[in-house]
Image (tube, rainbow, N blue to C red):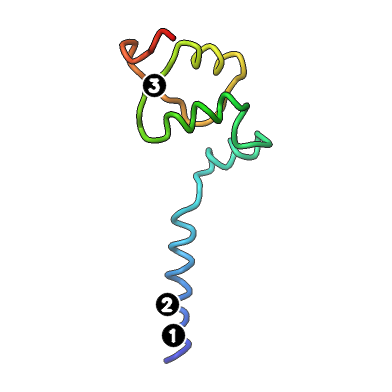
Amino acid sequence: MKSWTAEIVVSAVVALVLGGCATSQEWSDWKSHPTHFASGEHFAFSMRTSDGATQVRRSDIEIARAQNWWGKAITVAQSQVVAR
């Protein structure tokens, strides 16, 4: 009986661990870039918008295009783009 219980516990732990893994697309993105952020500006933008606030500056958009940032794109309405 003990080995049966241990097998269930191990299976549950494995299921939990695998359930939290990245998708194949996310793994592909990670493997194609040596760092998490493309630049210091990319890091600053991610920290500034990590709480769900989508206040994007026009300069953020220009820098993102110029530096070819990667990751999940944030889409905002034109009215949410700040002219700074």
- Mark 3 vs mark 1: give the one in front: 3
Q: Which mark is residue 63?
A: none
| Side of 17 relative to 68 (left or right) | left
Tell me how far mark 3 sits from mark 2, CA to CA: 43 Å
Where residue 44 sits in the image (x, y, percent)? 53, 28
Q: Which of the 4 image quarters holds residue 31?
A: top right
For image coordinates 50% across by 16% down, the residue present is: 60
**Dot 2 and dot 1 residues touching (CB under 8 Å):** yes
- Badge 3 marks a residue whose secondary structure is loop
Residue lying furthest bottom in this view? 1
- Badge 1 marks a residue whose secondary structure is helix
| Side of 51 relative to 26 (left or right) | left
State the residue position of label 1. 4
> Which residue type does callout 2 highlight?
Ile
- Mark 3 vs mark 2: give the one in front: 3
State the residue position of label 3. 75
Look at the image and tell me in which quarter the N terminus lies: bottom left
- Badge 2 marks a residue whose secondary structure is helix
State the residue position of label 2. 8
Where residue 57 sits in the image (x, y, percent)? 44, 14
Look at the image and tell me in which quarter the C terminus lies: top left
* Image vertical order of residue 21 relative to residue 78, above or below: below
For image coordinates 65% across by 34% down, the residue present is: 33
For image coordinates 44% across by 56% down, the residue present is: 19
User: Tag 1 or tag 3, which sits nearer the N-term?
Assistant: 1
Q: Residues within 10 Å of mark 3 (few under 14, many from 20)?
A: few
For image coordinates 42% across by 77% down, the residue present is: 8
